[in-house]
């Protein structure tokens, strides 16, 4: 039997897509193009309104292929849980299931073997291992469908994560710990993210770990145990902490569970306690009833916290969420203009931050190929550095020769080494 698998969205989705391919191959399936496949599997994302539109268009394209070739289309992931009606409206012959790997295995006719960390995934990037540590979240945000799609927190054991981590070290040096909220890791099994990181950092070797997105209230809860771990240079000095808005009233409508000042204080502490750390964040512009003055509060917060990486989204109503039925929905042109303004501010802030790195020598791990040629490596604080030539999956000492708002330019140097610090003080 032949199978075509494609996936979209967050690093959790990418990891699940890798596992689907690996599970299928280990059970006798042959990976193929969509035109030759007996099964077509699309792992969907539904985090934004525009993403929905893209997913629906792609599902229609795959359904045309399935009907033409008498193959079976399976729509997997978040979209079937958040908006099943739109899939059923395309074709009654489509099988749609939520992000349930065991159920997918059953639909594919695989018996007697469940998905497990022992399965060898078919990876998108040979230099990077994506390690899902938990799924679900503790929040009930009014704009988000994650709770509908993923449910409550379900964590993998430290032992199972560490086992896959150790088995992967021979072939990979970069590891992404991923989930819908890494800060919530372990709440259901009486452990925590710092416990997990301590276990992984106890392993000998030269590698880098990136911690995925965590919500501010969970970061505050684990802060005192997490921060000292960044003195180990095998842990990227990078965190993704979404604020979503700079207005207390809007944050309350969103049910985010913190105030602007609490977030600002948290980021200021991070910048003081972990010098050079990159803190990425997310902003939603045009949330229902957001006023001009409240939007300018968000602009001020971006400037005050010197946010170097900001993922900007225009509010789009997600099906079956509270915000979808709120009064005061804003016109598209208002959201577009606010997006344009905040993009300009973020670009200026990011450029100012990157200028501080000009001329520095950084230890960089090369994990990407640049779409314009060359390679992309990551500094200790996860800044992307474009290199003309390098060996994929290797460490280099690199001098930063030029800077742009969203990336750096570097050249490999050999006359000066940058030693790896496993334990010690920040510098």
Image: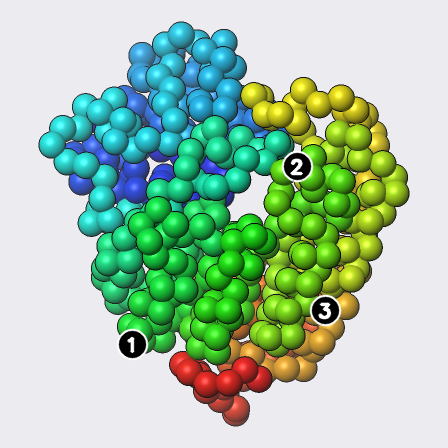
Q: Is residue 38 above or below residue 382?
A: above
Instruction: Check residue 254 in the rendering and tell me which mark sits there, or answer none.
Output: 2
Q: Report the residue marked by disc 1.
A: 204
Residue contact at pointers 2 and 1, CB within 8 angstroms: no
Q: Is residue 34 visible?
A: no
Closer to the camera in the image, 423 or 381: 423
Q: Is residue 117 above or below residue 147?
A: below
Taking the spot 53% from the left edge, 30% from the top edge, the residue there is 145
**Of all residues shown, which one is farthest toward the left?**
112
Q: Residues within 10 Å of mark 3 (few under 14, many from 20)?
A: some
Q: Is residue 232 above or below residue 124?
A: below
Q: In the rendered view of the protein, which quadrant contains the C terminus?
A: bottom right
What secondary structure is marked by label 3? helix
Colour setup of the view: rainbow
Q: Determine the CA span between mark 2 and mark 1.
A: 43 Å
Q: In the rendered view of the protein, which quadrant contains the N terminus?
A: top left
Q: How many marks?
A: 3
Q: Is residue 232 above or below residue 17?
A: below
Residue contact at pointers 3 and 2, CB within 8 angstroms: no
Q: Residues within 10 Å of mark 1 (few under 14, many from 20)?
A: few
Q: Determine the CA span between mark 3 and mark 2.
A: 30 Å
Taking the spot 31% from the left edge, 16% from the top edge, the residue there is 71
N-terminal-most mark, 1 or 3:
1
What secondary structure is marked by label 2? helix
Q: Report the residue marked by disc 3.
A: 353
Residue 152 as seen in the image, left or right of residue 239: left
Q: Is residue 209 visible?
A: yes
Taking the spot 64% from the left edge, 53% from the top edge, the residue there is 281
Horizontal and vertical percent for residue 199?
Answer: 31, 67
Horizontal and vertical percent for residue 418?
Answer: 50, 86
């Amino acid at each position: 039997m032949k199978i075509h698998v494609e996936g979209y969205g967050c690093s959790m989705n990418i990891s699940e897509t890798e596992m689907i391919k690996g599970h299928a191959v280990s059970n006798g399936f042959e990976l193929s193009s969509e035109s030759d496949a007996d099964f077509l599997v699309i792992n969907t994302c539904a985090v934004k309104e525009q993403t929905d539109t893209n997913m629906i268009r792609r599902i229609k394209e795959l359904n045309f292929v399935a009907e033409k070739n008498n193959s079976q289309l399976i729509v997997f992931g978040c979209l079937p849980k958040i908006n099943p009606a739109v899939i059923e409206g395309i074709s009654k012959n489509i099988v749609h299931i939520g992000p349930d790997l065991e159920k997918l295995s059953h639909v594919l006719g695989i018996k007697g073997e469940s998905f497990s960390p022992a399965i060898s995934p078919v990876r998108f990037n040979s230099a990077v291992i994506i390690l899902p540590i938990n799924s679900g979240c503790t929040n009930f945000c009014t704009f988000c469908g994650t709770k509908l799609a993923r449910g409550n927190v379900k964590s993998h054991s430290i032992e199972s994560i560490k086992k896959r981590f150790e088995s992967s070290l021979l072939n990979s040096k970069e590891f992404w710990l991923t989930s819908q909220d890494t800060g919530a890791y372990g709440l259901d099994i009486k452990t925590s993210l710092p416990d997990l990181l301590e276990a992984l950092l106890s392993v000998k070797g030269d590698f880098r770990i990136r911690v995925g997105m965590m919500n501010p209230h969970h970061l505050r809860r684990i802060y005192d145990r997490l921060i000292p771990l960044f003195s180990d240079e095998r842990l990227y000095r990078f965190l993704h902490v979404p604020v979503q808005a700079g207005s207390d009233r809007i944050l309350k409508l969103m049910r985010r569970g913190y105030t602007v000042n609490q977030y600002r204080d948290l980021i200021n502490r991070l910048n003081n306690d972990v010098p050079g750390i990159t803190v990425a964040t997310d902003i939603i512009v045009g949330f229902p009833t957001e006023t001009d003055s409240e939007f300018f509060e968000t602009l001020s917060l971006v400037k005050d916290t010197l946010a170097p990486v900001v993922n900007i989204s225009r509010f789009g109503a997600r099906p079956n969420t509270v915000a979808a039925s709120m009064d005061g929905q804003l016109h598209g042109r208002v959201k577009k203009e606010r997006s344009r303004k905040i993009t300009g501010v973020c670009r200026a802030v990011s450029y100012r931050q990157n200028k501080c790195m000009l001329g520095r020598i950084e230890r960089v791990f090369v994990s990407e190929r640049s779409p314009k040629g060359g390679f992309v490596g990551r500094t200790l604080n996860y800044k992307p550095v474009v290199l003309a030539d390098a060996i994929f999956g290797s460490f280099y000492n690199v001098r930063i020769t030029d800077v742009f708002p969203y990336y750096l330019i570097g050249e490999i140097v050999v006359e000066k080494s940058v030693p790896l610090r496993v334990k010690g003080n920040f510098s």
